[in-house]
Image: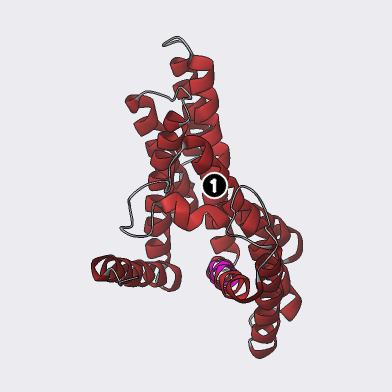
Amino acid sequence: MAMNWKTFFTRTWTALVFGAVMLTGLLGPWYAFWLLFALVQCLCIREYFQLMSHKGITVPGPAIQWGLQLWAFTMISFLAVPALQEHKIIPAALIVLPALLLFGEGLRKQGSAFSVLSGLGSVAYIVLPLNLLMLLYRIDAVLPAGLIFLIWINDTMAYVVGSFIGKTPFSQISPKKTWEGTGGGAVLTVLVAFIYGKCNTHLPVQHWVVLALCAAVAGTMGDLFESKLKREAGVKDSGSFMPGHGGALDRFDSLLLATPFAYAYAILFLQ
């Protein structure tokens, strides 16, 4: 089969730009991290509603969708920007606003119950995990970067191992995943975390191993969940944000499920 050079170069340049942006956000100052994941959050919400619409589920109208994105941006900004935390009225507004938006949506049109449920789904599936990621950053800026790096290691190792010895399908949701690849990826991810923890004294090695388990186990489940959403919606990618690589949800699906587990561990054992 002849190489499609146009597709190859598109995917390569997109990956390079994406990698540069991610490194700037993860390794740069706090406001770079904040802006990166505020943008990711808004893109994921938009793609989520597109998937729900493709599935035939009634979604909130454009005004409510924009309102939810503005609320999500304000929420993550409140957690990120120290100056905003001096204003006590902001937390109350952040709690009340989405309820008012969705209540208004519920009164607006027929089939609105599903519209409200899809709105709540965007909060639980996207807004909550990415705001927990911001809280994880406030506990220790190394944790989100480490979690994302380990998710990338797991995805890469699972693909490599599966390509060589993968035979047993892991799930009908994603036929290309195999038990051999998934298990091999998880083992190698834990091994990488263990070696890194031994060489880096910033955190004890056991914390890196737990982060690796969050990346490998919860991250894989997050990937399968988003694959199921796409399959039910009848689409290949969640969006076209990254030419040749799909949308924001395609890039961050594993992180959305791994983050709550990593944050729960962090508040119990790291603070």
Q: Nearer the viewer, residue 44 or 68?
A: 44
On screen, residue 157 above or below 129: below
Residue 166 spot, x, y in % from top left:
65, 69
Relative side of 167 to 176, left or right = right
Q: Which residue is label 1 attached to?
A: 226
Residue at screen point 48% across, 22% down: 115
Residue extending farthest to the left is 6
Relative side of 172 to 205, left or right = left
Residue 206 spot, x, y in % from top left:
76, 75
- Asked whether residue 172 appears in the rendered view, the answer is yes
Report the number of discs: 1
Q: Is residue 150 magenta?
A: yes
Identify the secondary structure beneath mark 1: helix
Q: Magenta segment range?
A: 148-155
Relative side of 265 to 4, left or right = right
Residue extending farthest to the bottom is 199
Number of other residues with Cα within 10 Å of mark 1, as a class: few under 14, some 14 to 19, many 20 or more: many
Residue at screen point 54% across, 48% down: 227
On screen, residue 195 above or below 264: below
Q: Amino acid at mark 1?
A: Glu
On screen, residue 119 above or below 18: above
- Asked whether residue 89 appears in the rendered view, the answer is no
Residue 46 spot, x, y in % from top left:
39, 39
Q: Residue 133 occupies which quadrant of the picture?
A: bottom right
Q: Residue 267 occupies which quadrant of the picture?
A: bottom right
Q: Quadrant of the C terminus?
A: bottom right
